[in-house]
Amino acid sequence: MVRGILKGKLPYAARPKMAKLCDKSPTALDLFCGAGGLSLGLLQSGFRLVGGVDNDQHVLDVHKTNFPRVPILKSDLVSASGSSILESLKLRPGSIDLVSGGPPCQGFSAGGVQGPHDCRNQGVLAFARLVSEIRPRYFLMENVHGFLFKKHSSFRKQFCSSLELAGYTLKPFALLNAADFGVPQRRRRVFVTGCLADEILADYPAPVAGTGTTVHDAIADLALIDAISHDQDEDVFLGELGKPSVYSELLRVNRLGGPIKRLTGCQRTRHSKVVVRRFKSTKPGEQEQVSRFYRLRWPGISPTIRAGTGPEHGSFTAPRPIHPKWPRCITVREAARLHTFPDWFEFGGTRWQGFRQIGNSVPPLLAKAVASKIFSVLVHSD
């Protein structure tokens, strides 16, 4: 079942020789694109990604590294106009089939303050305005579960009213758990989609029974690195990994679909002896008493991998799960596996930045499940 969920076309950016075959595919523009979790899901579902836009140059650089054929644009999306974005990316008005995006969610997050005047909340309304100005046939937005809380009802009403006045029909908000779509992580996220009045609304995907992807499926083959490599500061691993599961085998690929030879994101945290003792005494499936970090269980799934905060909000590090076998927090690569990023996907900067890029992104496999429903309607309606 996992193989059936994961397999499919390699991303457009990973298949440069096949680009011309995709020229007539439905087009997608990813706003608030971040490092590219949603972008990757769009590509895997069949869309031709014509641009990624964000106000953070660092994540745009990561996006460009992983999707070298996709144009990027640095822009403050709260103040930018739809016409300026299209002009900067050299896109024709009316040429976009789907505008997608995951506006900043920290102001709505249940793990945060949830301040009603948090400036980051304005991204949701900016997304609605940009959809109205760019006028794609369809739109897709993702946000955290907290966006559905009663205290944020005014934002939801403004969001819906803005799009309805612009001629869009909206599907009711949907709360989807990534674990129901083959992601080995408990991660509930809100999605909303809609289309111009003369288009056919796409459904949300139904949970896939029997996926059961576990922590063991995702990262057990990486556990061998600790036994082989004694340099905890080494980020790149060039040796042999352990026996893959069906899940990890499908992620252990390079950009062209062949076996991966160079694995990044493997730097391990140097914990103090006191912390190591505490982690050792914490049983899998329980929280460590001081840090409150959760220790993963091989047969279980991961809790939500969170991003923490940026420099403008204190640069706080989010809690990171403890490895089920080794007395340490998981690596960036292990977090990426738990998020369904393939091994060719590279994250930029420090461990803190890598975890932020992952925690802020939509798991690609969940993004693919949602985007595939829109792609199917577009293909069959033309």
Image: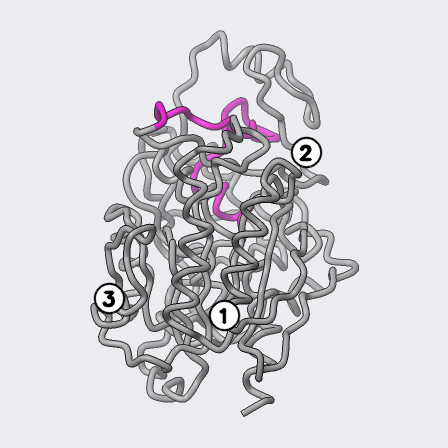
Q: Which three-letter amino acid code belongs to the residue tagged 1?
A: Gln
Query: Which mark sits nearer the N-terminus, 3 or 1?
Result: 1
Q: Which three-letter amino acid code belongs to the residue tagged 3?
A: Ser
Does residue 290 lie above or below 94 as drawn?
Answer: above
Labelled disc at residue 84: 3
In this view, the mark in front (2 or 1): 1
Q: Secondary structure at mark 2?
A: loop
326 magenta-colored: yes
- Residues packed near mark 1 inside 10 Å, few (<14), some (14 to 19) or many (20 plus): many
x and y percent of residue 375 in the render?
A: 55, 77
Choose between 230 and 58: the one closer to the eye: 58
x and y percent of residue 12 in the render?
A: 39, 74
Q: Which residue is mark 1?
A: 44
The part of the image, by quadrant, that contains residue 52 is: bottom left
The part of the image, by quadrant, that contains residue 23 is: bottom left
Residue at 41% from the left image edge and 60% from the top image edge: 129
x and y percent of residue 340 in the render?
A: 53, 53
Q: Secondary structure at mark 1?
A: helix
Report, in whole angstroms, how far the alpha carbon at label 2 lies from the one at label 1. Answer: 29 Å
Q: Residue furthest front?
A: 165
Report, in whole angstroms, how far the alpha carbon at label 3 lies from the one at label 1. Answer: 28 Å
The part of the image, by quadrant, that contains residue 300 is: top right
The stretch in magenta equals 313-339
Labelled disc at residue 297: 2
